[in-house]
Image (cartoon, helix red, strand yellow):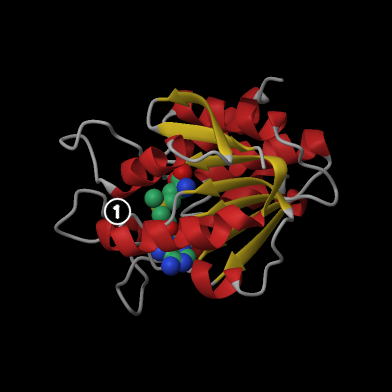
Amino acid sequence: MQIESAIQRLIDSTPGFMPKNEGAYLHKLALRSPGSTEHPLVEIGTYCGKSTLYLACAAKVLSSTVITIDHHKGSEENYPPFPFFDQRLRHRVTQDLETLDTYRDSLRLSGLDERVIAVVGDSNRYAKFFPQDTAAFVFIDGGHSSIQSWSDFIDWSPKLIKGGVLAIHDVFDDPAKGGRPPFEIVTALRHSRAFVELDQVGSLAAFIYSS
Ligand SMILES: C[S@@+](CC[C@H](N)C(=O)[O-])C[C@H]1O[C@@H](n2cnc3c(N)ncnc32)[C@H](O)[C@@H]1O
């Protein structure tokens, strides 16, 4: 199922960290998940909604809902001296990163906002209120520090229903290309009997929760 060209143009113009080939794979993975009215697609790390739009397109086909979680203040790697700091997204008062407004613009323009529930807050605090065994799809792309990556994995992977899809972003075999925590999580998943690996496209790795 192709993404409409107008939506793809909007995705391309939305600030974010999802290359087109990985976004297409994210969309395909969400479509093959058991997403439904009862079983949502969950995203940790909304930023400005680039990846959310790929998921929202799939949710529309599945008659499902995307629940996307972000405190919208950016991760440590979104601030100097890291190269991922976008001056355009500074909050006018605090000067911190602020991505909520841009996210809301992207979703409104897409016409897909009724497919998405945005949770503005900390992913680990919200996890305490979200039932286990509920999500058809969990996409982890929040903070990339070791503690944040692992706590998102520990808190959110048990939310999957059997047959659900777990996708992890920014998985780099070569340490020169990116941070280690997502790679370490994927290495652990490869040794787990509970998950079966699907393809990895670029830095997007995916698994099915099988038991
Ligand atoms: C790499 S960006 C997400 C990129 C997005 N998925 C895309 O494709 O453009 C990571 C996001 O995680 C958010 N984040 C980091 N730690 C978080 C936490 N503890 N709770 C909620 N959001 C968090 C940051 O605010 C940032 O927007």
Q: Quadrant of the C terminus?
A: top right
Residue name at image x 62 percent, y 30 percent: 29
Q: Nearer the viewer, residue 156 or 82?
A: 156
The structure residue drawn at horizontal position 41% and vertical position 31%, both measured from the top left corner, is 19
Residue occupying the far front of the picture:
193
Q: Which residue is mark 1?
A: 86
Name which residue lies at 76% across and 41% down: 35
In percent of the image, x 51 and y 70: which residue is there?
Answer: 124
Residue 209 placed where, x, y %?
Answer: 63, 40
Q: Secondary structure at mark 1?
A: loop
Quarter-of-image position of residue 195: top right
Could you tell me residue 144's position as x and y percent?
33, 54
In the rendered image, which quarter is residue 131 located in?
Answer: bottom right
Q: Quadrant of residue 172?
A: top left
Query: Quick check: which quadrant has ligand 1?
Result: bottom left
- Would residue 104 be seen by someone viewing this image from the given angle? no
Residue 165 visible in rendering: yes
What's under tag 1, amino acid-wise? Answer: Asp
